[in-house]
Amino acid sequence: MRIFKLAGSNFFLGWIMSSMIYLALLAVLFSTVSTLSFDKWRSATRDLVTIHVPKPAEIIDSDDGVTRLDETLKILRAFPDIESFTVLEKNDIERLINPLVDKDILKNILLPALIEIRLKRNNSLPDLNNALKNLSTDIFIESHAELFLPDAKAFSGAKKLFSVIVGLTLFVAMISIIFAVHAGLAINRETIQVMHLIGAKNGFIARTFQKHVLKVLGFSSACGTALAMGTFFILDRLLRVAFFGDGEIDIFKQINLWDWTIFMLVPVSYPLLGIIVAGVSVLTFLRKQN
Amino acid sequence: MVRFENVEIRYRGKEAILTDVSFDLGEGNFHFLTGKSGAGKSSLLKAIYMGIFPSKGKINLFGRDISSITKKEIPEIRRRMGIVFQDFRLINNLTVRENVALPLRIFGTKSSIIRRHVPELLEWVGLGDHLDDLPTSLSGGQQQRVAIARAVIARPVLLLADEPTGNVDDTIADRLLYLFKELHRTGTNILIATHNENLLQKFDYPVLRIEDRKLSFSD
Ligand SMILES: Nc1ncnc2c1ncn2[C@@H]1O[C@H](COP(=O)(O)OP(=O)(O)OP(=O)(O)O)[C@@H](O)[C@H]1O
Ligand SMILES: [Mg+2]
């Protein structure tokens, strides 16, 4: 039974609610995905350092013909806290900077040797530093974790921004419901009067309004969720093609049950909060009125 | 049932419409209320269903002084009344069937009962073919019968009917009066406002008459 006329405000409310739920879902999804990517990134880089050895082929001990690189490797082998290390081949290095530098120039410059090291513990870095500095002050250690430190700040800022977006959408959604309910109360003033004369209690009128609102909210919620999933699916595809190559990162697979629960909280809680807000608005209005 | 003691009724900022009105309608009554157009018939009914409160005097409803009735209690007391409004006040969003079902829904009657009783009654008032029509697609007389059906569907203790035969021909008027008689026989108290003198003569019920803001009583 559609006791109340709500056509105009329904349409308005439907649009706002769909958009707000859509926005909130995108924010939640981006927040989840960025956390996942960031965690993955950090754990991958935490114990990783790269050592730059300039002039690696220079013979530093003329008696034995030992090069600087040989000596460096000797120190590394003796160092207890190293899990593994690889000397990047010249080819690898060239490949890394190839896009940036012209091939011919590449031949003529002396490249440092790069050694990628995975440490057992991150805090053994100063010891390693000392050991290598004794060999040559030019040797330079680059910690990946430190490299990403500015990103960590940006990341926590982004997370805050996502929460603010979710908060804002919730605020706009609830304000719209209050607005739509008041518009509905004004349009249906006579109907409400008749219902009162028939013996309806305010609670009945509020419940009737809530049913109407719930229908709109349920529909909007489904629309917003479907749109968000669609958008995300497309973005996921695009990102994979653009950055990761196929199959290397599957964001959907990484999102676990807990993340999905948080995600589903939005399309469930917005309508629920919405009908509570609608009910309370109707009751306060009717109480003030008579 | 309904007792007025020296009641004065006036709309805000206007002269009194009724002054010093006293009457007592006991259990099992059937009355007509008559008077010229603008005399105050609808206003008197309004005072009974608490749509307006008296500026002077006392009104007693179902044994309760209405000045002692709280806002919260009003719905419960109104549920014992059925009201046929002069302007019908049907809900245009709802079909005929839904309009008549509304009081039962409000009172929380079982759906199965609603589904059975509503078409039965509508059949009886001659609207069996219009169950799913909207009120706006009905004639004035048909709308009036929907309004009557809505007022009586929940078997009220007191039926207040404002010009219930104003828009129908004599055959239907007789049929409606028969419906009211039937309700009266099964225990509903009835007060019908009308300026139709024919009706007063044809049906020999006591008459309350409003003249010059005063109410007089004749058997
Ligand atoms: N809501 C209102 N506000 C102010 N004045 C009103 C209101 N309703 C009715 N009146 C005035 O009260 C007087 C009585 O009106 P009422 O409707 O009770 O008459 P009535 O006997 O029912 O007339 P009718 O036979 O035409 O229906 C009229 O003069 C009318 O103008
Ligand atoms: Mg009238």
Image (spheres, grey):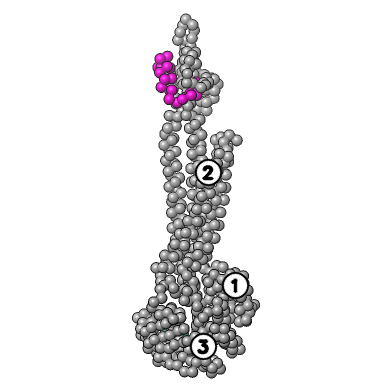
Q: Observer-nearest residue: A22 or B204? A: B204
Which residue, given by chain and number where applicable, does mark 3 sit on?
B30
- Disc 3 marks a residue whose amino acid type is Phe
So how many labels did they put on this image? Answer: 3
Q: Position of residue A171 (x, y in %)?
A: 43, 54
Q: Position of residue A284 (x, y in %)?
A: 42, 65
Q: Is residue B198 visible?
A: no
Residue B16, above or below B201: above
Question: Which residue is labeled 1 in the image?
Answer: B114
Q: Is the C-beta of the residue carrying label 3 under 8 Å from the nearest atom of ligand 2? A: no
> Which chain letter matches label 3?
B
Read off the magenta span: A114-137
Say whether marks 2 and 3 touch (CB < 8 Å). Answer: no
Q: Residue at x 51, y 80 (%)?
A: B157
For label 2, the residue is: A258
- Say which chain tag 2 marks: A
Residue at the image point whose x is 50% and y is 92% from the top: B206
